[in-house]
Image (spheres, rainbow, N blue to C red):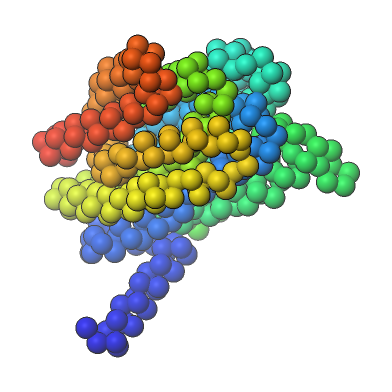
């Protein structure tokens, strides 16, 4: 290959990268699949990476406040995964509905579907926010937190749970943009939200000038404010008429038939992620019970790092959801299947590289956080064991998102019931408590379940029933 040809390819990649970040409007139902995946995946990877940065930023600053502060963040995040599950489930429904309408070239229908999904999400999370504020102390106690952790962490948990509505809107509206193929706006909303959080976190935790030090509570305040600013940015683009999805007074009106259709897709998607989240809650509790606060802190530290790399992989898989939804809307069934298989290959490659990174450099990565030595040892072990199944995670999440993008949210829900509740939870309990492996037994159960999920999802995907789902 000549130097001139190599330079031309490099220039084309850079140009494509620029197009992906700026958000050039494209028809993803025709043309090169490789290009389509690239244009969608790049902003989605950055978007998901930014979401994971929230937890890492909080952990970085909070870790300096001691193990009880770290445990508070970890246990609260474990419960918040229920909120995330509902938000992701709703966003999946929105992505499926919007993508299908965009594939059919029905932008007005896409806008109506987007607004109706927002009404459903708002209604659900107002109730969750109220419950989180009222029962914050009980939540930490149920999670097995020590008395000092509860005393320190209640205000943090109250603010984080109370901001559930903001979490919902941030996820849901980004799902709308992704379904429309406007992934760059979703990316920018998370960049803005994260930028605010990174600036505010040390200021509100430690105080500066006239601003008092709020300690761990300041971390929750910074996160809630940052996410709120991100949501305001999203709403601006939804209503200013320049994005692919444009909300008007007509689309704001409640359309009950469409709400029913969205709910029909959303409830299995929500249950699907709640099932997974409940599993993580059980695992977090068993780590705390069998290993104490130091094991809990090490496990939660490892999870934040693992999620930092899992969420970008989820971003790649989101590209498959958009391509499946739009391709089915355009009646391009083979293109939908090809998009999934090609995206799965890219994700497996990415996750393979991350696995090597964790296996070889786990100590250095964990060493970045100012933790006690016994906490670091637990974190390194968790990082290495859980990441051993990363390649399977990469393929499995693409398959799961393909089902969701097609509007077939029931199939992944059934997969999660069997693989998490009937396999992972019993296995973790047996290894951790019955066989006495403690936290290590919990760590082993995680990749074992993910491998089971991937095999199940691949077999069901190849059967092709998802192509027949009507949205």
Q: Quadrant of residue 3?
A: bottom left
Q: Quadrant of residue 152?
A: top right
Above or below 258: residue 235: below
Outermost residue on the left side: it is 463
Q: What quarter of the picture does the N terminus occupy?
A: bottom left
Is 445 in front, or is 33? 445
Above or below 95: residue 437: above
Is 250 in front, or is 131? 131
Q: Position of residue 72 (x, y in %)?
A: 62, 26
Above or below 78: residue 398: below
Q: Give the left or right position of residue 165, taking residue 48 as reference.
A: right
Total count of labels: 0
Q: Give the left or right position of residue 434, taking residue 304 as reference.
A: left
Q: Residue at x 27, y 17 (%)?
A: 422
Q: Residue at x 72, y 45 (%)?
A: 202
Q: Position of residue 168 (x, y in %)?
A: 52, 33
Can the viewer see residue 144 in this picture? yes
Above or below 203: residue 41: below
Is 433 in front, or is 109? 433
Q: Residue at x 29, y 64 (%)?
A: 35
Q: What quarter of the picture does the C terminus occupy?
A: top left
Q: Residue at x 88, y 44 (%)?
A: 210
Can the viewer see residue 139 in this picture? no
Q: Position of residue 285 (x, y in %)?
A: 48, 18
Outermost residue on the front side: it is 373
Q: Position of residue 245 (x, y in %)?
A: 44, 50
């Amino acid at each position: 290959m000549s130097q001139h040809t190599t330079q031309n390819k490099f220039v084309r990649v850079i140009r494509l990268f620029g197009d992906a970040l700026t958000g050039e409007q494209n028809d993803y139902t025709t043309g090169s699949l490789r290009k389509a995946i690239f244009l969608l995946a790049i902003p989605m990877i950055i978007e998901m990476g930014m979401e994971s940065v929230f937890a890492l930023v909080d952990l970085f600053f909070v870790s300096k406040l001691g193990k009880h502060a770290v445990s508070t963040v970890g246990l609260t995040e474990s419960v918040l995964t229920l909120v995330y599950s509902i938000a992701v489930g709703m966003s999946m429904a929105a992505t499926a509905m919007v993508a299908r309408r965009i594939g059919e070239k029905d932008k007005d229908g896409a806008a109506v579907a987007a607004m109706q999904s927002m009404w459903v999400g708002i209604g659900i999370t107002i109730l969750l926010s109220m419950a989180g504020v009222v029962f914050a102390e009980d939540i930490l106690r149920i999670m097995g937190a020590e008395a000092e952790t509860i005393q320190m962490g209640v205000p943090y948990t109250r603010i984080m749970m109370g901001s559930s509505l903001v979490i919902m809107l941030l996820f849901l509206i980004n799902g709308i943009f992704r379904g429309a193929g406007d992934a760059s706006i979703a990316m920018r909303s998370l960049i803005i939200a994260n930028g605010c959080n990174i600036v505010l976190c040390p200021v509100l935790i430690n105080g500066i000038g006239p601003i008092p030090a709020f300690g761990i509570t300041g971390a929750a305040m910074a996160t809630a404010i940052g996410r709120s600013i991100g949501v305001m940015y999203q709403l601006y683009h939804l209503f200013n008429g320049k994005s692919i999805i444009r909300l008007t007074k007509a689309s704001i009106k409640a359309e009950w038939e469409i709400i029913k259709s969205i709910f029909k897709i959303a409830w299995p998607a929500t249950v699907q992620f709640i099932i997974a989240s409940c599993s993580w809650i059980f695992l977090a509790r068993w780590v705390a019970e069998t290993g104490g606060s130091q094991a809990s802190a090490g496990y939660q530290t490892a999870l934040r790092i693992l999620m930092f790399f899992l969420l970008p992989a989820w971003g790649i898989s989101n590209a498959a959801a958009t391509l499946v939804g739009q391709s089915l809307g355009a009646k391009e069934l083979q293109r939908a299947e090809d998009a999934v298989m090609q995206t799965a290959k890219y994700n497996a490659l990415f996750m393979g590289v991350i696995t090597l990174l964790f296996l070889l450099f786990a100590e250095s990565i964990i060493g970045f956080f100012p933790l006690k030595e016994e906490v670091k040892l637990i974190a390194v072990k968790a990082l290495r064991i859980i990441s051993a199944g990363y390649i399977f995670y990469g393929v499995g999440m693409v398959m799961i998102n393909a089902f969701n993008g097609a509007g077939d949210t029931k199939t992944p829900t059934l997969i999660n019931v069997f693989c998490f509740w009937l396999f992972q939870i019993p296995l973790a309990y047996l290894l951790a408590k019955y066989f006495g492996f403690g936290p290590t037994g919990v760590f082993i159960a995680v990749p074992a379940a993910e491998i089971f999920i991937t095999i199940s999802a691949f077999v069901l995907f190849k059967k092709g029933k998802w192509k027949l789902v009507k949205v």
